[in-house]
Structures are given as structure tokens and as C-alpha cells.
Amino acid sequence: MGTLDFDGAVMTNDKEIDDHLHFMQLALGAIPSPFEAFLVNRGIKTLHLRMREHMRNGLAVAKFLETNPRVQRCFTRA
């Protein structure tokens, strides 16, 4: 079981929202501290391992669901 050190992201394709978020970031200083940046960098180093396990677990769940007669279709990216 892992831990969550730091989590944060905002994505949008709406220019108005982007402008508002950019203003808020500048006005409030919503910028990660050096320590938070360190935590993000540390987590990135093992991201590929965690994603591999997520895919493996997702595939196992999908295969299990496919054996259930009440499940008509099961879609997975794994």
C-alpha cells in the first residue's frame, strides 16, 4: 500500500476558465513549495511501476467480470 505525498493538477480546454485559474494562481501564489516539488519528483520516479500494476489489476477485474453471465460486455484499457 502506498502513500499520497502530494496531489494537484488542473486541466481545461476552456479559455475563460484557464484565464481565471491563471489569475488566481498569480493572485494567491498557488505554486508548489520546493518540498512539494521534491515530493512530486520523487513520485514520478516510480510512476511507471504503479501504472503497470494498475493495468494488471484492471485486466484481472475485467477477466473476472467476463466470467459473470450477468455481464454483457466488459471494456478495459488494460
Image (cartoon, rainbow, N blue to C red):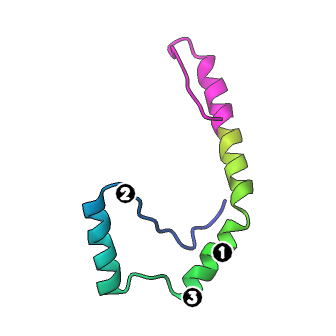
Indicate whether residue 60 is drawn in magenta: yes
> With 23 as the anchor, is 6 left or right in this view?
right
Q: Are marks 2 and 1 in contact (CB under 8 Å)?
A: no
Q: Label 2: how many residues lie within 10 Å, few (<14), some (14-19) or many (20+)?
A: few
Say if 13 sits above or below 43 in the image. Answer: above
The outermost residue toward the top is 69
Identify the residue at image location x=66%, y=69%.
43
Identify the residue at image location x=29%, y=85%.
27
**Residue 13: image location, x then y, percent:** 36, 54
Give the spatial CA distance, label 2 vs label 3: 25 Å
Say if 59 sits above or below 13 in the image. Answer: above
Q: Label 3: how many residues lie within 10 Å, few (<14), some (14-19) or many (20+)?
A: few
Mark sitting earlier along the chain (3/1): 3
Give the spatial CA distance, label 2 vs label 1: 23 Å
Task: Give residue 20's quadrant in the image.
Answer: bottom left
Q: Which residue is mark 2?
A: 12
Q: Are marks 3 and 1 in contact (CB under 8 Å)?
A: no
Q: Secondary structure at mark 1?
A: helix
**Residue 76: image location, x then y, percent:** 59, 31
Q: Amino acid at mark 2?
A: Thr
Q: Amino acid at mark 3?
A: Pro
Tell me the magenta residue range.
Answer: 58-78
Identify the residue at image location x=37%, y=86%.
29
The foreground one among 50 and 18 is 18
Q: Label 1: how many residues lie within 10 Å, few (<14), some (14-19) or many (20+)?
A: few
Give the spatial CA distance, label 3 vs label 1: 10 Å
Q: Nearer the viewer, mark 2 or mark 3?
A: 2
Q: Which residue is mark 1?
A: 41
